[in-house]
Image: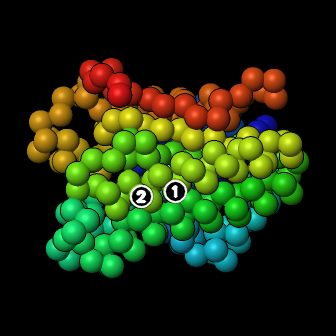
Amino acid sequence: MPALVTLGARNLGGAVLDRALAEGWSCAAIAQSDETLEAVRGRGAHGFRADVLDAGELEEALAEAAEALGGLDAIVDAVSIARMGPGDVWGGGPIADAGPESFERWAADVARQAFLFLSIGARALRGHGGGTLIQVTNATSVRPTPGSGLWSAGHHAMRAMTLAAAQELRAEGIHACVLGVDAPIDSPKSAPRLAADGIPPEGAVDMAEIAKAALFLAGQGPRGVSYELRLTASGALWK
């Protein structure tokens, strides 16, 4: 039975777990809150606590997950690192008005988390003969917009490191890839913002569709792989 671990399991990570379990994968998730870990275990998956911005905690949690699953075949980074601070606006706000603290929250932490996922995740897969690293990102990784420059900087770094790692690791049997969601994600977390912005259901991507794409990437064979897959909302034009 193939083994999959998600980083994050509250919203998108939970959807990935549901899809993987339905397809017969053995699953685990790494999260921080008791509520999320309880929900993970209620699905029939293993749950491990770690701060994904802490290298030591993440490395230990992945090792524990691999031991519990009896192996490791795919790791999906479905964590949202964005953190609103005092006076922040979504995306970090205009560059000229942002302070160093906003840069750390919206750019530096996003890039650091992606680096830790790729570096520690790659070493974990090396110990199990290879596998797949799937980095979920958003539209800001390819298209900055006014007010989201800081967040975009973090996601540009995320995309760049993943595509570089894909070239570095392919000879080792490790498939690193970007799963870009070029639209808002329809989740309980984002529902109030989607409603406030007047975005209809067809203007956002269903989490189940993203999970389906993640499992497609995780199941690709050695002779035909995708290094970057982008999903667009059915009601929106792609750019």
The dot on residue 153 is 2
Mark 1 crowdedness (10 Å alpha carbons): few <14, some 14-19, many ≥20: some
Q: Is any atom of residue 14 visible in this view?
A: no
Point out residue 45 in the picture as x, y percentages from the top left corner. 61, 50
Amino acid type at mark 1: Ala
- Within the image, what quadrant is residue 223 found in? top right
Give 115 or 79, whichever is nearer the viewer.
115
| Above or below, comparing residue 89 to residue 212 in the picture | below
Q: What residue lies at 23% left-to-right and 56% top-to-bottom?
A: 147
The answer to whether residue 226 is left or right of residue 100 is right
Q: What residue lies at 41% left-to-right and 65% top-to-bottom?
A: 107
Q: What residue lies at 75% left-to-right and 65% top-to-bottom?
A: 63
| Above or below, comparing residue 235 to residue 231 in the picture | above
- Work out which quarter of the rendered image holds the N terminus and state it: top right
Circle 1: element type: helix
Q: Which residue is mark 1?
A: 157
The reply to whether discs 1 and 2 touch (Cβ–Cβ < 8 Å) is yes
The answer to whether residue 124 is left or right of residue 215 is right
Point out residue 72 in the picture as x, y percentages from the top left corner. 77, 50
